[in-house]
Image (cartoon, helix red, strand yellow):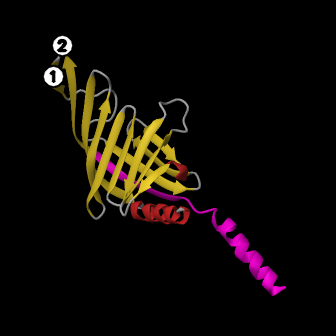
Amino acid sequence: MQKLFLTLVLILLPLVSSAEELIEGSMNCEVTYQITLNTNDGKPQISEHNIDRYKKGDFLVVKYSFGQLGLHFEVNDKIRKRTFNQHTFGLSDLVSISDSLSMFVGRNMRMDALSEGALTFGKNFIRYSDFFSQLRISRYYKGDWGGTVINDWGPYVEMSSLDCRPINDKVDKIFDVIDAKQKVLQ
């Protein structure tokens, strides 16, 4: 009877433990510089114009989480209370992984947005791109990150630099979980 119980526990344990906890991380990013490049009659025009979005001195919150649905990524404009660059990638969207980077390509679960997106998520580098924008940030010292956001709005391109500090640093933990899951699937 004890052997039967032990065997049953060993069989059911992976099913019970698969309901893993959500791991959530975030970082606060200050927009330290911003420039807009416009082309008018084939000639470049540079300005500090922005299009009712974040601007120099504003703070963006980069949020990332990993749970049963996969890896979720979003950027929030705290001042204007807007969320953009939001995407959830399932493990089936994982196309490659190396010692320090995992790459996801997938369709957005939101039906109201252009739905293609790609995310490279690593211990020292995060890059997200969709139809209109690219966000690239890299770790340069412990929890300090820096990077750029490029928004392509047709006739003009808006470029911003970011200086980021962790609110809740879970990058390494999430990457390690993704890496372990990928190794089990191989």
**Residue at 25% over, 35% down:** 159
Q: Mark 1 points at which residue?
A: 44
Residue closest to the far top: 41
Is 11 covered by the magenta stretch? yes
Element marked by disc 1: strand
Is 56 covered by the magenta stretch? no
- Left or right, 6 with reference to 180: right
Q: Mark 2 points at which residue?
A: 41
Position of residue 105 relative to residue 11, above or below, is above
**Residue at 33% over, 39% down:** 134
Residue 73 visible from this viewpoint: yes
Residue 85 visible from this viewpoint: no
Range shown magenta: 1-30
Residue closest to the far bottom: 2
Element marked by disc 2: loop
Q: Give the residue type at disc 2.
A: Asp
Q: Residue 183 carries which label?
A: none
